[in-house]
Image: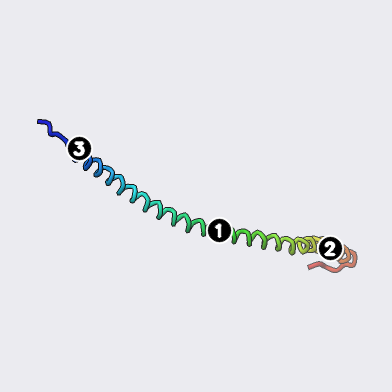
Amino acid sequence: MVKKITLEDLARMVKRGFDVVDDRFEQVDKRFEQIDKRFEHIDARFTEVESKIDYLTISITEIRQMFGPLAQDVIRQEQVTRDLRRRVERLERKSGISHK
């Protein structure tokens, strides 16, 4: 035998269905709020890392500017030292002084 469903029964069934969907949406909303908070935290960390990278980039540029001329001076001094060493070795050979 088929049970007759009244309009009120149908309304209750529909309401229960909507209640279940509403509960699930609330759970989804809570999870999205948690995810949003995590993204905010990650975004703040990225901002901090970007700031540190910018600082390091500026520092490296300043170091290069300071040591660029110094490196050129070192290269010139190495060339002078090699030249002087050759000259001393030549003088030692001509004068008979042994080189240790």
At mark 1, the secondary structure is helix
**Label at residue 7:** 3
Distance in Å between CA atoms under marks 3 and 2: 106 Å
Residue 19 lies left or right of residue 72; in this view the side is left
- Asked if the residue under mark 3 is in contact with the one under mark 1, i.e. CB atoms within 8 Å, the reply is no
**Measured from the top left, where is residue 59 in percent x and y?**
67, 63
Q: Position of residue 27 (x, y in %)?
A: 33, 51
Residue at the far left: name it.
1
Residue 97 found in image quarter? bottom right
Q: Residues within 10 Å of mark 1 (few under 14, many from 20)?
A: few
Q: Amino acid at mark 1?
A: Thr
Tell me the element at label 3: helix
Q: Residue at x 84, y 63 (%)?
A: 80
**Does label 3 or label 2 sit earlier along the sequence?**
3
**Label 1 sits on residue:** 47
Marks 1/2: CA–CA distance = 49 Å
**Residue 80's mark?**
2
For the C terminus, the quadrant is bottom right
Q: Secondary structure at mark 2?
A: helix
CB under 8 Å between discs 1 and 2: no
> Is 30 in front, or is 45?
30
Give the colouring mode of the picture: rainbow
Relative to 83, is 68 on the left or the right? left
Camera-side residue of 56 and 16: 16
As drawn, which residue projects farthest toward the right?
A: 94
Tag in front: 3 or 2 = 3
> Relative to 16, does residue 57 appear above or below in the rendering?
below
- The type of residue carrying mark 2 is Val
